[in-house]
Amino acid sequence: MLKGKVFLRKASSRSHESVRGSSNPLLPVIAAFVFFIAFVGVSILLTLRARVPQVVSQGSNISGFPTAPALPSNHSAATPNVNSASGFPVVPSAPSPASPRSPFSSSSPVPQSATLDASTARQLVESWLAYKKTIFSSPYDLSAIENHVVNPGPLYSDITRPSGSVDWLRSNNSSYFYKELKILDVTDFRQFPDRAHLTVRIFEDLELRTPRGTDFSKSGQKTHSWVYELKFNKGKWLVYDYRKDI
C-alpha cells in the first residue's frame, strides 16, 4: 500500500515537471514581445516630447492666436503714418507731387530765398540784350560777361570758346550792329526748383558788316519768341541758356 502511494507521488511529480518543461520554450518569445512593445512605446513618447516645443514656437503665441511670419525690416513701408490719433485707423499719407523740372537741364534745388518774379526776370534779359550789342561788335569786350551769363554754362561756352560766336566774328573781322533790340512782351514765366524760364517776344533790327560789305542773309528785321533759362548762381540770377520757343 505504501509503495503504491510512493509510486503515485512520483508519477504526479513527473507529470508536473513534464508540463513545466514543455512550457519553457514560450517564455523567451513572450519576453521578446513585451520588450518590443515597451521599446515602441518609449520611442513614440520621446518623439512626441521632441515635437511639442517646435509646434508651440512656430504655430502659436502666448494669446493662442497664430503668429504671422515676420516681414522684412522696412520702417518706411511698415509705418505709413505713425502720428495718427489712438483708436483711429492709420491712413497712409498721399505722396506729395514731384516738383516740375526744367526741360533744359537739372541741378540741385536753389534756396527758398532765391525767388524770382516775371518783372525781375525781364529786367535780367533786357540787361543781357544791352550787353549783347557790345560783345558782338569790335572790340568784342567780354570783360563783364560773367555779370550777365552763368560761367560755366552753355551760353557762356558758345560765346567764349575757340571757334565760338565771338571768335568767329573776330577772325572774320566782322561785327553785328543792332539798330534796335527790345522785348515786345512776356508770354510766359515759370520758376522751377533749380531754374526759371522766361518766354519773350523779341524784335531786332540788325546788320552784319563784313570786310566785303553787309551780309544781307544775316541782316534785317526779325521778331522771334525765345525761352530764356535763368539760373541762380553765386547769390544772383543770371542767364544760363536760351532757345527758340516752339
Image (tube, rainbow, N blue to C red):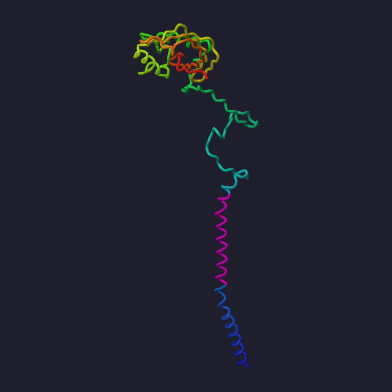
Query: Principal SS element in the magenta part?
Result: helix
Q: Quadrant of the N terminus?
A: bottom right
Percent of width and height locating residue 7: 60, 90
The stretch of residues the image draws in magenta is 30-55
Residue at 57% in and 58% down: 45
In the rendered image, is residue 66 in sight?
yes
Work out whether 218 lies above or below 61: above
Q: Nearer the viewer, residue 132 or 114?
A: 132
Percent of width and height locating residue 230: 47, 16
Percent of width and height locating residue 48: 57, 56
Residue at 61% in and 45% down: 66
Q: Nearer the viewer, residue 172 or 198?
A: 172
Q: Nearer the viewer, residue 234 or 69?
A: 234
Q: Is residue 46 magenta?
A: yes
Residue at 45% in and 17% down: 241
Numbered circles on residues, count: 0
